[in-house]
Structure formats: structure tokens, C-alpha cells
């Protein structure tokens, strides 16, 4: 049973409200007080841990109950229950990471702060999940709304727990219409979906491509990057890993509301994509693909390679679309993916200036699928590709690769 149903049952129970001598608005005051008391308790726990207090000592000091201490190393958590102010909560110790935390998944909230009548708990809430503010808007004041939003959009403690969902919008093909990927936030995964999005956009199959970031602990929305024709052709900022730190500092109620509205908008788009693909939930979205590595007994010839459609530079890596055609690709790499009605191959070169290395990504494009292959050029091919890329960059930028990268580094440092 979700939070909204539990809260609705209480505010619709007029006999209970009369017995406690409280109003519907008081119910939300109790939730606000409960959230603030959890924050107070977590601060106390953090301070005790800083002093060197052990978990067992903490339980004794706070008068914990129902203790479970992992003496034999069998369990990954120690815990005890605790009555604190108007709450009954469980305090956990993650023995692997040695974290002491208040469990927000089962919070017993009593009406002590809003009523003089002693009774059992009002409800047991999962405060990791949102409360529908719009549904209860008539009972929620601005100060309560701010506390509810700040509780849900909590600070992000573990960046490694963030995941991304990428999808195409305003689409013109079956593949782009159904395109959606999910994976951990890593530089490698971000680059993979970004390249896939650039490929879809360049083939005129969509006019917008979005990458949304979520907190893996409670699936809360963090932020989103929306790419279109303009910013697919310019360097994308390197601060994607700074975004979680930035949003954790949001305290202004208006900004939190904007974030909530953006979450609703993105979530609806993602659910629509899931329905198109017959996915029962977001959990069924396929992971970001690992590109199949391929090899070749043949050598790519200089006369076979040219570049077109401009360049993209990010993190010291330059990306350019090559003119390798389907016949050359199948001859060189032994691929037989296409039926040649409207299918084709795209081949991209990525040149890493810092490590003087390169790779070719080959995309087999059909109306309803994409297959991605990665080829690491031989040393002779690498030198030929670098020289060809150098000539192409000079023709469109008027400078060599070294000067171009130095200029970009200077801009990034400003």
C-alpha cells in the first residue's frame, strides 16, 4: 500500500480526527514533524559515530529495542528499533560500509505532536517515496510542501548509484520511436548512448534525444540533458558528474518544484516508451549495449576513407563520420547485416589525442534495429586514419589537430 492511500485513509476517517481533536491539515503537520525528527536523529547518530561510539554503544545510549548485532559476521546489517519523539524507526549499521542510518522505509508516525490524546500510530510511511502534493494540496501549506520535497529529493551520497535512461523524441522511424536504454552513470555508458543518439539524429530519425539521470537509492529524478540539432554539433560540457552534487544543494522551494515537474514530464515520456516496447516496468528497459568487438585480416586503404558532416570533440576525443561504404565494410570486416532496401552502415572514427589511439564504431542501421561493432585499427591503419583526419580538420577548422585541442583546453580552463 503506497503512502497516498495510507494518508487518505486517515484524513477520510472523520471519527478518528474527532477523537484526536485534529484537522486534516494537522495530519500533514505530523508528517512534517516526523521528517524533521528523522533529520535530527540522523544528525545525532552521525555525531556519535564521529566520536567513535560503536553501534552497540549507540543502541544502549539511545535506549534501543529489538537489537540484532552481527557477532558472527553472518548478516550484512546490524539494527535496533528506537522510539524517538513521535516516531518508531529502525536504525541500521551497514557492516560492510560501516554506515549508521535511520531506515526511512518503515517509519511509524504517532500523533504526539498534534494531539494530546494517546493512541496508536497514524500510519507507517515509506519516506523514501514521494507524497502526492497535488492530491492533498488543500491541506498542505508552503512550509510543509518544502519539507516534503526536500525529504524526497535528498542529498545524493553515492554518485556510483546513479543511473541514466536515454531515449529519442519526435521520431520518424520505428527504431527511433522505440529507442530507450538504461545503465549506470559512467563516462563509458554516457558516451555510448550519446553516440547512439547522434547517430539517430544524423539520420533524421528524431529531432531530440534525451538522457535523464536518476538516483538508484529511491529512483528520484536528478536532472536531464536534452540534445537537438544545435548542441549535437558542439562540445558537450564535462560536468555531468558534477550535476548530482549541484542538485543536492537545492533548498529553494521554487527550484524543488521545477525539479518535481521535470520529473513528472520525463517519467511520463519514459513510461510511454515502455508501453511502446511492451515493457511492464522501467526495470525491463534493456541495459546500454556493449559493442561487439570485431577484427579484420584486411587493411583499410587510404583511398577508401574520407570524412563528412563535421566533427564532435569531447574529453580530448574527436569523433567524425567516415565515408566507408557498405561494400567496403562487409569486405573488410565480414559483416552481413543488411538487406539493402533502406538499410545501411555508418562508420565513425574516434581519435583520442591524449593517448594517440583510435577506434572505429560501425553501426548496422535498419528500420527497427541497431547493431554496434567496435574495431581497433592496426598500427599502420591508425597512422593513416590520423593523417586523413588531420587533413579533414584543417579543411573545416583551418588548424591542425594539436592546435585545435590546445584551443579547446584553454577554453575549458577559463
Image (tube, helix red, strand yellow):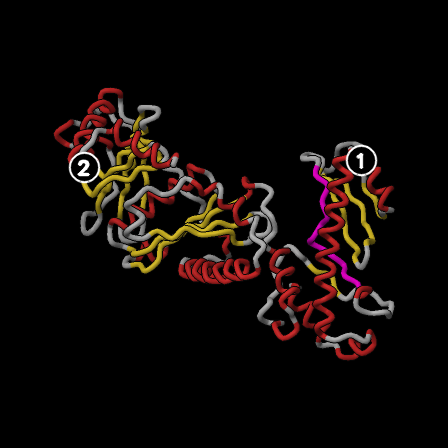
Quarter of the figure with the C terminus: top left
Residue bounds of the magenta highlight: 99-110
* Element on which disc 2 rests: strand
* Element on which disc 1 rests: loop
Indicate left or right for 121 with 292 as reference.
right
Q: Where residue 350 sits in the image (x, y, percent)? A: 29, 33
Going 41% across and 59% down the picture, which residue do you hit? Answer: 273
Indicate left or right for 320 with 243 as reference.
left
The 10 Å Cα crowd at callout 1, few under 14, some 14 to 19, many 20 or more, is some
- Taking depth in this image into account, of 197 and 176 the one nearest to the observer is 197
Which residue is labeled 1 in the image? Answer: 53
Q: Where residue 392 sits in the image (x, y, percent)? A: 18, 33
Q: CA distance from mark 1 to mark 2?
A: 64 Å
Where is 222 relative to 147, above or below?
A: above
Image quadrant where residue 118 sits: bottom right
Which residue is labeled 2 in the image? Answer: 307
Amino acid at each position: 500500500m503506497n503512502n497516498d492511500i495510507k494518508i487518505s485513509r486517515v484524513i477520510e476517517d472523520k471519527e478518528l480526527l474527532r477523537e484526536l481533536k485534529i484537522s486534516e491539515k494537522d495530519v500533514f503537520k505530523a508528517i512534517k514533524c516526523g521528517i524533521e525528527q528523522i533529520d535530527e536523529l540522523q544528525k545525532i547518530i552521525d555525531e556519535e559515530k564521529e566520536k567513535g561510539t560503536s553501534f552497540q554503544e549507540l543502541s544502549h545510549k539511545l535506549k534501543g529495542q529489538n537489537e540484532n548485532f552481527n557477532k558472527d559476521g553472518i548478516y550484512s546489517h546490524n539494527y535496533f528499533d528506537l522510539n524517538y519523539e513521535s516516531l518508531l524507526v529502525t536504525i541500521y549499521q551497514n557492516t560492510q560500509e560501516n554506515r549508521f542510518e535511520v531506515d526511512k522505509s518503515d517509519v511509524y508516525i504517532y500523533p504526539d505532536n498534534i494531539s494530546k490524546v494517546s493512541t496508536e500510530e497514524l500510519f507507517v510511511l515509506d519516506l523514501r517515496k514521494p507524497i502526492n502534493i497535488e492530491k492533498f494540496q488543500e491541506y498542505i501549506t508552503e512550509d510543509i510542501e518544502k519539507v516534503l520535497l526536500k525529504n524526497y529529493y535528498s542529498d545524493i551520497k553515492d554518485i556510483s548509484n546513479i543511473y541514466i535512461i536515454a531515449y529519442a523524441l519526435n521520431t520518424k522511424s520505428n527504431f527511433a520511436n522505440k529507442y530507450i536504454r538504461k545503465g549506470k552513470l559512467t563516462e563509458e555508458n554516457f558516451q555510448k548512448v550519446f553516440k547512439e543518439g547522434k547517430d539517430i539524429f544524423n539520420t533524421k530519425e528524431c529531432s531530440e534525444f534525451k538522457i535523464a539521470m536518476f538516483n538508484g537509492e529511491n529512483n528520484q529524478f536528478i536532472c536531464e540533458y536534452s540534445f537537438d540539432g544545435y548542441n549535437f554539433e558542439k562540445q558537450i560540457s564535462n560536468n555531468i558528474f558534477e550535476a548530482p552534487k549541484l542538485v543536492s544543494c537545492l533548498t529553494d522551494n521554487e527550484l524543488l518544484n521545477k525539479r518535481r515537474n521535470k520529473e513528472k514530464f520525463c517519467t511520463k515520456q519514459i513510461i510511454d516508451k515502455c508501453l511502446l516496447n511492451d515493457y511492464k516496468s522501467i526495470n525491463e528497459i534493456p541495459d546500454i549495449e556493449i559493442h561487439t568487438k570485431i577484427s579484420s585480416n584486411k587493411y583499410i586503404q587510404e583511398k577508401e576513407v574520407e570524412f563528412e558532416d563535421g566533427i564532435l570533440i569531447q574529453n580530448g576525443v574527436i569523433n567524425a563520420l567516415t565515408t566507408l561504404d557498405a561494400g567496403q565494410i562487409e569486405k573488410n570486416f565480414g559483416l552481413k547485416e543488411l538487406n539493402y532496401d533502406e538499410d545501411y552502415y555508418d562508420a565513425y572514427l574516434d581519435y583520442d589525442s591524449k593517448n594517440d589511439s583510435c577506434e572505429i564504431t560501425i553501426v548496422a542501421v535498419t528500420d527497427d534495429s541497431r547493431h554496434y561493432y567496435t574495431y581497433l585499427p592496426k598500427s599502420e591503419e591508425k597512422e593513416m586514419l590520423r593523417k586523413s583526419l588531420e587533413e579533414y580538420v584543417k579543411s573545416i577548422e583551418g588548424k591542425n589537430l594539436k592546435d585545435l585541442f590546445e584551443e579547446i583546453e584553454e577554453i575549458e580552463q577559463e
